[in-house]
Image (cartoon, grey):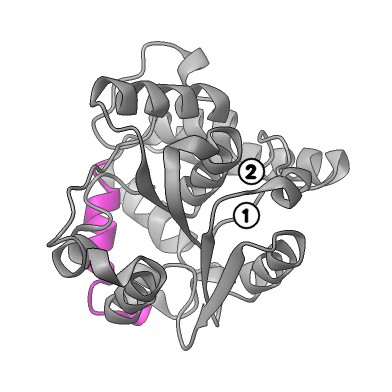
Amino acid sequence: MGNIHEFDEVIKLLFADFSYLTIDLPGHGKTQVLDDECYPMASTAAAIIQLLDELKIDQCYLIGYSMGGRLALYLTLHFPHRFIKVILESASPGLATETARLARIKGDTQIARKLSRIINQDDFYDFLNNWYQQPIFGDIKNHPQYQSMISSRLTNHPLNLVKSLQFMGTGSQASLWELLTKNTIPLLLLVGEKDEKFVDINIAMTEKCNLAKLQIIPQVGHNIHLENTLEFVQNIQKFLDPQLL
């Protein structure tokens, strides 16, 4: 539910010696989506590759968080020649079985119904507060930047998030698990210690992919870059070529 400002604090610490590009995905921030065909992962990935082409960016580093991490992994596995190294924060390759995907779609449909019933900012605020009570987020509600994060999330439109959930949710995504064995790009997998669900997922990812390095960040949940920005950045710096920093 983020936008192009999601990594602002990371950018301040990490990218003094880099050019960087942040993107509002379909359904998020200020990206205008003309039809439903633009939302699915394959379409979004193709649009990003087209954008890189237009900007004449032949290769780059790639960072993605949560849903953006799933998209980053998709891009890595389908367009490996475009990326040098890839950082995935609290990401997954999707769900391995059709049964699991159908169950997830059922759950996502219930979430979409709640989003579609939102009629004002107070409703949206309540929805977001409930969202961040999920166990994967650990103690994020106690973080001093929590309210600032919520304010940023409130700039999204609930009905656009419904579309994103419908077409690019985990249940709608084809599994990438088997493609992991063919990966040729160095991956850094970052997960929070309190996000036990994604710790397990990312351990399984490293077992599938020899080029994946897993780093579990202590005392944080799903949103590592907010809860411990400095350690998040330090892990990325160690992963990237030190001569470029």
- On screen, residue 2 versus residue 40, left or right, reads left
Q: How many marks?
A: 2
Determine if the magenta segment contains residue 172.
no
Residue 27 quadrant: top left
The reply to whether callout 2 and callout 1 are in contact (CB within 8 Å) is yes
Spatial CA distance of label 2 from label 1 is: 9 Å
Position of residue 193 relative to residue 33, above or below, is below
Tag 1 residue: 92
Question: Where's residue 98, x and y in %?
Answer: 85, 38
**Helix, strand, or loop for circle 1?**
loop
User: Going 42% across and 67% down the picture, which residue do you hit?
Assistant: 223
Dominant secondary structure (helix, strand or loop) of the stretch shown in magenta: helix
User: Going 49% across and 45% down the picture, which residue do you hit?
Assistant: 72
Tag 2 residue: 170
Residue 23 quadrant: top left
Question: Where's residue 62, x and y in %?
Answer: 39, 49
**Helix, strand, or loop for circle 2?**
loop
User: Going 61% across and 64% down the picture, which residue do you hit?
Assistant: 212
- On screen, residue 171 versus residue 154, left or right, reads right
Q: Which quarter shows the C terminus?
A: bottom left
Residue closer to the observer: 240 or 224: 240
Q: What segment is highlighted magenta in the picture? A: 141-155
Residue 76 quadrant: top right
Amino acid on which the number 2 mark rests in the picture: Thr
